[in-house]
Amino acid sequence: MAMEQEDMEGRAPAVPMQWAHFKLGMIVAVIALVLDQANKLWLIFSYDIAEKAPVSLAPFFDLVMVWNRGISYGLLQQESDFGRWALIVFAFGVSIGLALWLFRLETRLAAISVGLIIGGAIGNAIDRIAYGAVADFYSMQIFGFDWYVFNLADCWVVVGVVGLLYDSLFGHHKKVSNRSKM
């Protein structure tokens, strides 16, 4: 039986940073998924948004009920079971790929961002499995322009992508600067 090597002071080595980032990303994914699904279940079954919609929360923000059979912005609408299941398989495939990528990430921001994307992708895939379409509720109007209707899962994906962009533009720069000072 192999024993873990200890450092000079007799302590077990620290958990590799990549493993810590993987765990962080997966915890964020689970939290994002649970929040998304809880929000959808409450709006659909407890609040009964389909009966009450539209509900104006602000001059620019309404609660509505839209079943989206496509992807973001209603693109690639899928009316067939094959198309629906293709989107489900795609979402889970991307989520698995992102989960594997979590092992290689070097920053907490990147891990959190990827976790948000995974949680959002799986949340919308669960909708497709359960309802045949994604439940969207939030509608924004700005300067007379109606934005697309979205849900929390969509928000998680957008915030995750923004986080990854920020990390790739500014996070790496800080590491390179700190390494060059050594």
Image (cartoon, grey):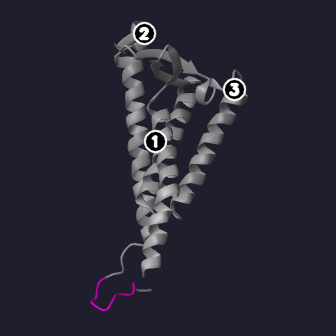
Q: Position of residue 173 (x, y in %)?
A: 49, 64
Quarter of the image with the N terminus in it:
bottom left
Q: Which residue is mark 3?
A: 81
Whether 59 is among the magenta residues is no
Residue 60 lies, with reference to residue 96, above or below; the image says: above
Q: Nearer the viewer, mark 3 or mark 2?
A: 2
Query: Considering the numbered disc 3 on the image, is that residue within a helix, a strand or a loop?
Result: helix
Q: Is residue 68 left or right of residue 80?
A: left
Q: Which residue is mark 1?
A: 159
Judge the density around disc 2: few (<14), some (14-19), many (≥20) Cα neighbours within 10 Å. some
For badge 1, the amino acid type reads: Val
For badge 3, the amino acid type reads: Asp
Q: Is residue 172 left or right of residue 85?
A: left
Query: Considering the numbered disc 1 on the image, is that residue within a helix, a strand or a loop?
Result: helix
Q: Which residue is mark 2?
A: 54
Q: Which residues are magenta?
A: 4-11
Q: Position of residue 73 (x, y in %)?
A: 60, 26
Q: Are marks 3 and 2 in contact (CB under 8 Å)?
A: no
* 76 or 33, nearer to the observer: 76
Q: Is residue 89 left or right of residue 9?
A: right
